[in-house]
Amino acid sequence: MEIKVVPHGIDAEKLERIAFILKTVAHPVRLGIISLLESNKELTVTDICETIQTEQSLTSHHLNTMKLKGILNSRKKGRNVFYSLKEKDVTQIIRCLDNCGCNM
Amino acid sequence: MEIKVVPHGIDAEKLERIAFILKTVAHPVRLGIISLLESNKELTVTDICETIQTEQSLTSHHLNTMKLKGILNSRKKGRNVFYSLKEKDVTQIIRCLDNCGCNM
DNA sequence: TGTACATATGAACACATCTTCATAAATTTG
DNA sequence: CAAATTTATGAAGATGTGTTCATATGTACA
């Protein structure tokens, strides 16, 4: 019997890339932050901490992680740092997950 | 300034659930398996190993992981075990990722 | 029954991740 | 300048994950 191999051309590199993004996103706190930044153009660390109820340090670490991995931007103003989503892509992933599934 | 909080009702529990699924999926080998099972109703371990070029044991471990976490089914026939996607949801996640983004 | 084949399993190790804590650094304000 | 505020950082420990290796289990077939 014939095995249909990667019909849409999902090569090893692409799998790596997708996995990388998913890994970056696959954490409740980080998902919470992303979801928040989806509806607020930019927010300070304190905003985020207060809204999703997480420790300052923990939040900062997660923000840094996401910034390093390329899905967040940051802008410094005064003693605040404003974070925002870098690419629309992540937004779309979340929207997709929110819409079409994950009812397990 | 007002912070818009979780407009679509993404509560903590939902974040956990989404993160759980994403974590399960967020690995190149597992993504490869899923992508393969998307275009092939069911496949044996050997089929998968040969197609995506992974060791038998490694493949088996990943299959088991995904089965335990509830995104794969398995059916035994003779000395073969046939694996298949359990829920459409995962398929949709992958399709979404394939279509709408991840161009980072 | 014995041999080959298909799959699972478990231990062990390396490595990554998450979280907390204490503290540093930068900035504003009194 | 001193105190308060905001954010970052780094160490440390706990925990989780990925991979390999050796081997077990189950099945088919000569």
Image (spheres, coloured by chain):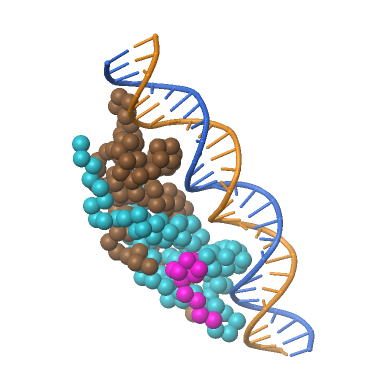
Chain colours: A cyan, B brown, C orange, D blue
The answer to if B39 sits in the magenta stretch is: no
Q: A66 above or below B17?
A: below
**Tag count in the figure?**
0
Is residue A103 in view? no
Q: Nearer the viewer, residue B90 or C17?
A: C17
Q: Residue D4 lies in what quarter of the image?
A: bottom right
Kindly identify the residue that appears in the image at 23 percent across and 52 percent down.
A7
Q: Nearer the viewer, residue B13 or B86?
A: B86
Q: B93 above or below D7?
A: above
Is residue B41 in view? yes
Residue B103 pos. (x, y %): 34, 67
Residue B68 pos. (x, y %): 43, 39
Kindly identify the residue that appears in the image at 44 percent across and 68 percent down.
A71
Q: Residue A76 lies in what quarter of the image?
A: bottom right
Q: C11 above or below B3?
A: above
Kindly identify the residue that appears in the image at 33 percent across and 36 percent down.
B46
Residue A25 pos. (x, y %): 45, 60
The stretch in magenta equals A66-76
Residue B62 pos. (x, y %): 42, 42
Q: Nearer the viewer, residue B2 or C12?
A: C12
Kindly identify the residue that appears in the image at 20 percent across and 36 percent down.
A1
Q: Is residue A102 left or right of residue D10?
A: left
Q: Is residue A87 left or right of residue B16?
A: left
Q: Nearer the viewer, residue A26 or A9?
A: A9
Tell me the quarter of the image containing the C terminus of chain B.
bottom left
The answer to if A73 sits in the magenta stretch is: yes
